[in-house]
Amino acid sequence: MTTLSFEFFPTQTEEGTSRVLAVRDELAAFNPEFFSVTYGAGGSTRGRTFSMVEAIQQRGIAAAPHLSCVGDSTADLRDLLQRYQALGINRIVTLRGDLPSGSGLASSELRYANELVEFIRKETGDHFTLEVAAYPEMHPQASSFEKDLENFVRKVKAGADSAITQYFFNADSYFHFVDRVRAMGVDIPIIPGIMPITNYSKLARFSDSCGAEIPRWIRKQLEAYGDDSDSIVKFGEEVVTDMCRRLLDGGAPGLHFYTLNQAKPSLAVWKNLI
Ligand code: FAD
């Protein structure tokens, strides 16, 4: 069975939240396993993430909060875990997070995602299904590809149940990553994270910062479209659909869409696949 999930980010206003809930309702027709909501490292969106998770959970399909450890105290994390348990949440996307300046890592009580996985297991046993992040093209701060694989394996051994990847536009990087960690004894599902292409300049900026590569043949065509956003969307849909088809045909257990709080781009791809 192919699993499907969608990711949102918390909005600043009530109006924004209403819009996300309307998007959620449109996506719910495709029966995803869960909707996840991102978390600002250091607790910057703590209240807003919680409110959106609560609103989504109340509408019927499970909500999965993201939770990051860098810059958050264990007391705050414990409190949040208890509140999520009380809300009936049973899945958490478990992360280190990125503080804006990269500062705060040394002084943080928990410094890496494996420590947060251990902390949640210690506090709540097997209550939560824990997702962790995976980087087929290597985490941008990793000292080497090998070290990054070892660090990924460490958080799986700490108790992760499943992984969601950073987005990529090169299916081979996913297959290579999966082969490598399988050879290291990892047997949890590794779900590709999918970023629909809708806006080239924003995508290029974001990809630079998170270490996701836009292959030259895609970049050059997107650049050539300039302001012609219809062509960018059409080409992006084709490229991402083809990649998703390859991923699923090659054994990927499901897809996790980075929706950027919009229904249409993710649904366009998903509808091409079903
Ligand atoms: P880790 O697994 O801790 O890895 C971070 C870096 O440290 C890597 O280079 C790794 O190789 C290295 N490392 C790991 N463990 C150790 C160790 N024990 N000792 C030494 N080095 C180690 N960010 C947010 O702020 N909020 C979100 O909601 C959010 N959601 C995300 C969802 C997904 C699916 C993904 C893929 C990323 C998300 N991010 C989010 C971004 C993520 O927080 C950053 O990429 C962050 O830099 C790393 O997080 P991580 O959990 O992968 O960290």
Image (tube, rainbow, N blue to C red):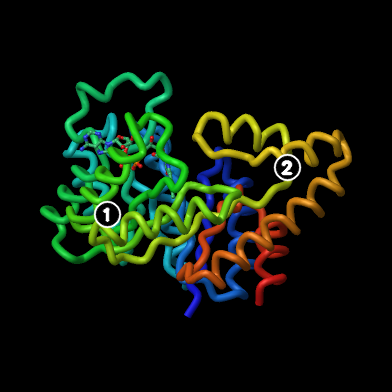
Please tell me which residue is depicted at 14% across the width and 62% down the height of the picture: 125
Q: Nearer the viewer, residue 79 or 91?
A: 91
Q: Nearer the viewer, residue 7 or 77?
A: 7
Please tell me which residue is depicted at 86% across the width and 39% down the height of the picture: 225
**Three-letter amino acid code of the residue under disc 1:** Arg
Which percent across, then down, holds residue 56?
A: 48, 61
Please tell me which residue is depicted at 84% across the width and 43% down the height of the picture: 229
Marks 2 and 1: in contact by CB < 8 Å?
no
Which percent across, then down, holds residue 177?
A: 41, 53
Q: Nearer the viewer, residue 248 or 261?
A: 248
Regarding residue 86, the answer to whether it shows in the image is: no
Query: Taking the image as four quarters, which one is ligand 1 found in?
Result: top left
Q: Nearer the viewer, residue 17 or 274?
A: 274
Q: Earlier in the sequence, mark 1 or mark 2?
A: 1
**Three-letter amino acid code of the residue under disc 2:** Trp
Query: Which residue has dot 1 on it?
Result: 83
Please tell me which residue is depicted at 40% across the width and 37% down the height of the picture: 139
Say which quarter of the image contains residue 221. top right
* Left or right of 212 on screen, residue 145: left
Query: Which residue has dot 2 on it?
Result: 217
Regarding residue 218, the answer to whether it shows in the image is: yes
Residue 244's tag is none
Which percent across, then down, holds residue 135?
A: 42, 45
Of discs 1 and 2, which sits in the foreground?
Answer: 2
Residue at disc 1, CB closer than 8 Å to ligand 1: no
**How far separated are the C-alphas under marks 1 and 2?**
47 Å
